[in-house]
Image (spheres, rainbow, N blue to C red):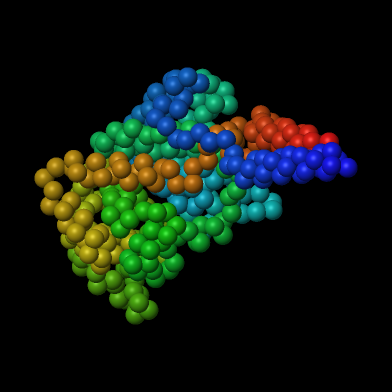
Amino acid sequence: MMAAAARAGAGAGAGAVVALLLLTMIAMPPPAEAHLQIGAYNETCPQAEEVVLKEMTAMVGKSPDLAGAVLRLFSVDCFVGGCEASILLDSTADSTAEKDAPLNEGVGGYEAVDAIKAKLDGACPGVVSCADTLALAARDSIRLSKGPFIPLPTGRRDGNRSVAADVALNSPAPGATIADIIALFATKFNLTAKDVAVLSGAHTIGKARCSAVSPRLYNFGGQKGASDPTLDASYTATLRGECKPGDNATLVNLDPTTPTVFDTSYYALVAGKRGLLSTDAALLLDPTTKAYVSSQANATSPDQFFADFAASFVAMSKLGALTHHNGEIRQACSKINPPSSAGGAAAARSRRHLTATAGLLATLAVALVL
């Protein structure tokens, strides 16, 4: 009887140990995920960054405005769900995608990304994600516009969610103040007021539709014929010549001084009340952003802006990035991979991991009753 009790006690002790082991296994985090890193394709596709630069060089050489379009495309992608190429997905019969959201009207550069991805898949089939293709193309847009070269970590994978309604949820609301914008950047993206001012400097290249500026030119504040008083009067007259009432399609330069050169002239324009967008003008309404605008408007060299932009750009490029077994490598950037494709390999690995874990748990459970 004592022996039986001893065996029972030992069994209880062993059971406690196994139970503790089970709890420990359940509580353990999954194996460390891979992180973004410089040269993530050095072994799997060593020519990847060279291919992107070569293609972007050719395309920007023919169409200089493409640089600004691709840079904006990347920013729009990162601020909605992270830098996982969701902006590139097409709408389906069941869902309207981000690219077709009203706020993304006029966003371009999709064809450039598709063309570069095709070249990358020709060199290294199924290796480089659409997310990294877009990220590297945006990085090179800056370089090819006489901006800084930014060492950019790679290793992003592609997401499979793209919902138009997400765009408004991650964008400043109509009538948002600079305080609202800074709060949005801080709470959703962990970016600072300085980052807001620095990343706004991307408006040194690219264009915007008249629909984005017309509310500042006509009937401002609901007053017939009124214009935004924070916009320089002579610049208002110039813009009215480019954007006639009701014209929503014409494109105007964000930086009319040097529209295809990545430099600090944007800040001089904003400081002189010639920022094209209301969000540009808003930079003068916060002490931190205003101070940054003033410092760069009066800078004798772009070096500080270049250094600041590189840091903020890399920080932005990491937002919501999917790595390792998360996400997929899309075959076509506009569509998620079919379930049977190689893109389902990550899910298969996950299922195998769960099956193996379940088997181990079953073995340990048997040990509890022996």
> Within the image, what quadrant is residue 108 found in?
top left
Quarter of the image with the C terminus is: top right
Q: Where in the figure is residue 277, as x and y percent of width and height? A: 32, 60
Q: Is residue 305 above or below residue 122?
A: below
Q: How many marks?
A: 0
Q: Is residue 133 above or below residue 80?
A: above
Q: Where in the figure is residue 283, as x and y percent of width and height? A: 27, 62
Horizontal relation, residue 325 to residue 235: left or right: right
**Would residue 365 be seen by someone viewing this image from the given angle?**
no
Horizontal relation, residue 243 to residue 98: left or right: left
Outermost residue toward the right in this view: 1
Q: Which sits in the foreground, 115 or 74?
A: 74
Q: Which sits in the foreground, 329 or 252?
A: 329
The residue depicted at 29 percent of the width and 64 percent of the height is 282
Horizontal relation, residue 159 to residue 247: left or right: right
**Would residue 314 be seen by someone viewing this image from the given angle?**
yes
Outermost residue toward the front in this view: 2
Q: Where in the figure is residue 102, as x and y percent of width and height? A: 51, 59
Quarter of the image with the N terminus is: top right
Q: Where in the figure is residue 220, as x and y percent of width and height? A: 34, 74
The residue depicted at 60 percent of the width and 32 percent of the height is 331
Horizontal relation, residue 21 to residue 290: left or right: right
Q: Which sits in the foreground, 197 or 91?
A: 197
